[in-house]
Image: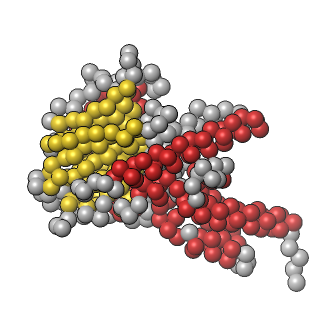
Amino acid sequence: MEKESIISRIAFFVNKVLALLTFLAYLLPFLAPKLFPFFSVLTLLLPLILILNAIFFVIWLLQLKKKMFLSGFVLLIGITFINKLYRFTETKKEVVSTDFTLMSYNVRLFNKYEWLPNKKVADEISSVVKSYNPDILCFQEYSPNEAVNLENFSFKAIELEGHKNKYGQAIFSKFEIINTGKIKFPNSNNNVIFADIVKFKDTIRVYSMHLQSVKISTDIHEKLDESKSKFIFKRISEAFKQQQLQSELIKKHYENCTYPKIVCGDMNNSAFSYVYRNIRGEMNDAFQEAGSGFGKSYNFKYYPARIDYIFTEKTFDVKEFITDNQVKLSDHFPIITRLNIEKR
C-alpha cells in the first residue's frame, strides 16, 4: 500500500474541518443570530466555503481518491444552498401586454459625498432607469437630487430622515399608489417603506427594505491584526442580531397584508442566513426563479456578494431577472425583474 504524503494528509485534514464548518453553516438559517451571533458570521462566508468544497472534490476526483466523497456528500446535502449561490441557466419568458417590471437599487445617496470620482452619478443613474424603463422603481439610500430625472413616474412614496442632509427610501410608480406606510426599526436609521399600487384591476403591495448594515467595506482593504478582526466580527454579530429583530418586524407586518406582495431591497445579508429565510418565508426569490450566474449585487472585490433581493408571492410569475453589474454608480448594482400576476 502506497504511503500517503504529508501534503495529502494535511489537505484532507483541512477538507474535514471545512466540511464541519459547512454543515454548521447549513444549520445557521434555522438558528436565531441572537443565540449564536459569532457563528452567524459564517453565513457571509458560505459562498466561499462551497467553492472550496468544490475545489477539494475536483482535486480528489482527478486523483481518483475516495476522499472526494466527503466534499461530494457535503455538496449534495447542500444542493439547495448551491441553487441560491449560482444559477446555470437564465430564464426569460415571452413578453405579454400584462407584464410589468420592477427595479430595486441602493443608490448610495447618488454619490452625495463623492465616494466615486464621477461627478455625474445622478445623471447616469437617471439614464440607467430610463433605459430599463421599469413600471415600479425602489430606491434605498435615496436622497433628493435635482439631477435625478424620474418624470416617467406619476406616483411616488418617499420617506426621509435628517435635517440638513435628508436621506431615506423612495418608491416610484407608473401605476396609481393608493396607500403608503413604513415600518420603523428601533435604535436604527434603517427602515422599510411600502406602497399599495393599483395595476389594472389588481392591487399589489410593494415593500422596499433597507436592513442594518454590517459596515465591512471600509475595513476589508486594511491590514487586519487580531484586535481589528475581533472588532469586525463583533460588529457583524451585533448587526445580525439587529437584522433578526428587523426581519421579524417585516414578517409580522406583511402577514397582515391581504394584497399580493413583493418585498425587495437591500437586506445586507446573504441568501444563507436566518434573516433571508425569515423574510422570504414562502415567497419566491426572483433570482432563483429566473436569474443567472452568481447574481452578485454588491460591488465587493473578488467575492460574489448577493445581498439585494426581490421576493414575490406565488401569485406572481417571475418571467425575467437581471443583475446589472456593469452599472458601477454605487456600491450596489441594480436588480430588475419582469413579472405577471397569475389568475387567481
Examine the rendering and report whether any part of residue 168 can be seen: yes
Q: How many marks?
A: 0
Seen as rendered, the residue at the extreme top is 164
Quadrant holding the C terminus: bottom left
Please say if 122 is above or below 277.
above
Residue 183 relative to residue 146: left or right: right
Q: How is the image coloured?
A: secondary structure
- Which residue shows up at 52% across the image and 56% down it? 274
**Residue 250 at x, y percent in the picture:** 40, 49
Please say if 114 is above or below 187.
above
Seen as rendered, the residue at the extreme bottom is 1
**Residue 226 at x, y percent in the picture:** 77, 38
Q: Quadrant of residue 192?
A: top left
Q: Nearer the viewer, residue 65 or 331?
A: 331
Q: Quadrant of residue 69?
A: bottom right
- Which residue shows up at 37% across the image and 26% down it? 161
- Which residue shows up at 50% across the image and 68% down it? 80
Q: Quadrant of residue 128?
A: top left
Quadrant holding the N terminus: bottom right
**Residue 309 at x, y percent in the picture:** 40, 50
**Residue 258 at x, y percent in the picture:** 24, 56
- Which residue shows up at 52% across the image and 70% down it? 79
Q: Nearer the viewer, residue 81 or 69?
A: 81
Residue 84 relative to residue 42: left or right: left
Residue 177 relative to residue 41: left or right: left
Q: Nearer the viewer, residue 299 or 74?
A: 74
Examine the rendering and report whether any part of residue 301 can be seen: no
